[in-house]
Amino acid sequence: MIQYLPMSNEQTHPLHSTDKNIIDLLISKEKPEDLDLINLARLINRYSDFPGEMEIKNDIEKILKFWKISKNELFSKTKNIWSKSFRPSNTNKDLVGSGFDTSN
């Protein structure tokens, strides 16, 4: 049985405002590019076990539905993107330190 914390115990993530800006950009994309897929997967990993941030978690689910992709499909696509030598450019500093591991 899943037990949810009461609303008063929900935390705000330190990167909320930065991540919310990224989420808002992703919501407007009809056809996501590689970087969009990477950003969404990264945010899913960041917020999946975080207590709180229901707005961001709900937005993530909306984006998945809008793009018609499951989390597993997303992670498979992003693993493929990273394995083809994708590296964030200097303008994508938000991706640095994502901790993604391309090894099998």
Image: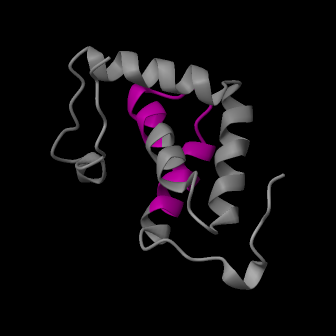
Residue 74 in which image quadrant: top right
**Rendered location of residue 21, percent (x, y):** 49, 60
Could you tell whether 100 is left or right of 42 in the image?
left
Between residue 80 and residue 65, name the one nearer to us: 80
Could you tell whether 73 is left or right of 54 in the image?
left
Seen at 49% across and 19% down, the residue is 76
**Rendered location of residue 46, percent (x, y):** 47, 53
Between residue 1 and residue 9, name the one nearer to us: 1
Residue 28 in magenta?
Answer: yes
**By what rule are the colours in the image chosen?**
one colour
Seen at 71% across and 43% down, the residue is 61
**Rendered location of residue 27, percent (x, y):** 62, 45
Residue 44 in which image quadrant: top right
Residue 15 in magenta?
Answer: no
Q: How many marks?
A: 0
Could you tell whether 50 is left or right of 38 in the image?
right
**Rendered location of residue 90, percent (x, y):** 15, 46
Q: Which residue is the extreme one toward the bottom? A: 8
Could you tell whether 26 is left or right of 38 in the image?
right
- Span of residues in magenta: 19-39
Seen at 32% across and 17% down, the residue is 104
Q: Which residue is the extreme one toward the front? A: 1
User: Could you tell me what secondary structure mostly forms the magenta stretch?
Assistant: helix
Q: Is residue 80 above or below residue 94?
A: above
Q: Is residue 50 above or below residue 58?
A: below
Q: Is residue 48 above or below residue 78?
A: below
